[in-house]
Image (tube, rainbow, N blue to C red):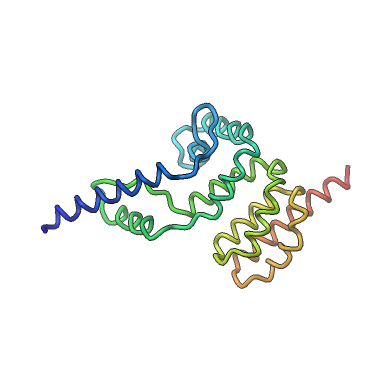
Amino acid sequence: MNRHVRLLLLILLLFSAAALAVYFWPKEPSYQGKRLSKWLAELDIRSTSGANGREQAIRAVCALGTNALPTLTTMLCTKDSPWTKALIKLDAKQSLFHFPVTPASVVQARALQAYGILGGLAEANVPVLIRILEEEPSPEIRACVAFALGQIGRGAKTAIPALRKATGDKNARVRQNAQLALMNIQMWDLDRSFR
């Protein structure tokens, strides 16, 4: 087989895999006909929608509220599959066409922004996040979860023991995010005591 035929077959295989993934992908909540992940993409710094689009995205996340939590948890735990890594490398090597691939780090960052928007509304998700923080082998995901707990603020008080333990983690980013989360959670309590 020549090189062009192999490349065409690879592209067809990848598009077929992507179509199957979209079909079987868990359903996520939507607001005004737009999925949560699309709203979160509007929060990106490079988003073309500008300040108005960002404000609409914030309103959408608030409107979705606790319905967004299962999807946000899944997004925090996203890992790049071998296929995703291969497509990212392929995109970097050529400029003829680009696959619509979003790296796990971007998906996680979007979820973290949503936790920041929801704040205390995400309190119901704290037990799930604690379990992930204590059991997840990936330091990147543990760091994201610690950060998310800090974004929840005072509502994440039950996570304080797990976060204290995480301040001794082998990974520097996990330690740092756990410390920041503890400061944020405790800051809310201090703010409340000064009122």
Q: Quadrant of residue 80?
A: bottom left
Q: Residue furthest bottom?
A: 170
Relative image position of residue 112 (x, y in whole percent): 59, 48
Q: Which residue: 20% across, 53% down?
A: 7
Q: Relative to residue 42, is residue 155 drawn left or right?
A: right
Quadrant (top left, top right, bottom left, bottom right) of the N terminus: bottom left
- Residue 92 to residue 46: above or below: below
Looking at the image, which is closer to me, 154 or 25?
25
Residue extending farthest to the left is: 2
Q: Quadrant of residue 133?
A: bottom right
Quadrant including the C terminus: top right
Q: Is residue 133 above or below residue 13?
A: below
State the image quarter where residue 159 is shown: bottom right
Q: Is residue 106 above or below residue 35?
A: below
Given residues 175 and 17, the one toward you in this image is: 17
Q: Residue at x 60, y 60 (%)?
A: 143
Q: Is residue 71 left or right of residue 79?
A: right
Q: Position of residue 126 (x, y in %)?
A: 70, 51
54, above or below 10, in the image = above
Residue drawn at (49%, 28%) of the image: 33
Which residue is drawn at the image coordinates 88% and 47% (left, top)?
Answer: 193
* Residue that extends furthest to the top in the rendered view of this protein: 32
Q: Position of residue 194 (x, y in %)?
A: 88, 46
Camera-nearest residue between 192 and 70: 70
Residue 30, given in percent of the width and then of the height, sits at 53, 33
